[in-house]
Amino acid sequence: MPIPDHQLTQLRTDLLAHEKRLLSLKAIAADAQHGLAQLRPDQPDYQKRSQSLKNLLADAENETTLHETLIKLGQDPKVLAALGEIHDKPEVADQLQSNPQAFTQARGIQLPPGLTITATRSTPHSAVVSAHYQAGRLQNRMNWDLDKGFTSQEIR
């Protein structure tokens, strides 16, 4: 049996939230760029305001990268097939746990640089797969639990 439909629905809902956040990040980045373009060196607090806007822009760009990576991962049919395989045979998670690179390569999964993937099993009939990704100062962990489904958590 592949990943249950209710878990896939949960994943789609989570991915939509990431896509909505991307739209707001584009607006934040555009506002920061506009603010930088409007600054003049003779303005009060020019250095402070300039650095603040540059930091805001860098954070928006990093968060954009993070959300794009999570969306790509969550939509990757090879990733979903591997999770389906673990769903059907939780012991397959042991292969992922012992050698993540061999596991992903054997299934043709291309993980982006900086993304790490792990698996744990607390009982013979359970499995949790976690993907950790960092972009700049931002980190996120996306989990799939055989019983509980998908979750995504920003780490600060």
Image (cartoon, rainbow, N blue to C red):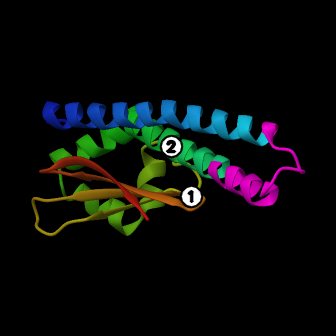
Q: Quadrant of the N terminus?
A: top left
**Is 55 contained in the magenta span?**
yes
**Is 99 contained in the magenta span?**
no
For the residue marked with disc 2, what is the amino acid?
Thr
CB atoms of marks 2 and 1 within 8 Å: no
Would residue 95 be found to the left or right of residue 6 on screen? Answer: right
Query: In the rendered image of this protein, does residue 11 appear above or below residue 43?
Result: above
Query: In the rendered image of this protein, does residue 12 appear above or below residue 79?
Result: above
For the residue marked with disc 1, what is the amino acid?
Gly
Main SS of the magenta part reads helix
Q: Nearer the viewer, residue 22 or 148?
A: 22
Residue matched to label 1:
114
Image coords of residue 48 (percent x, y): 74, 60
State whether residue 7 appears in this view: yes
Residue at left offset 50%, top offset 56%: 115
Residue at left offset 81%, top offset 43%: 39
State whether residue 4 appears in this view: no
Q: Residues within 10 Å of mark 1 (few under 14, many from 20)?
A: few
Residue at mark 2 to residue at mark 1: CA–CA distance: 10 Å
Image coords of residue 152 (percent x, y): 32, 50
Secondary structure at badge 2 equals: helix
Q: Residues within 10 Å of mark 2 (few under 14, many from 20)?
A: some
Image coords of residue 35 (percent x, y): 72, 39
Image coords of residue 98 (percent x, y): 36, 68
- Indicate the quadrant where residue 47 lies: bottom right
Q: Nearer the viewer, residue 103 or 131?
A: 131
Question: Which residues, given as a range, are shown in magenta?
Answer: 37-56
Q: Earlier in the sequence, mark 2 or mark 1?
A: 2
Q: Quadrant of the C terminus?
A: bottom left
- Residue 69 numbered mark, or none: 2
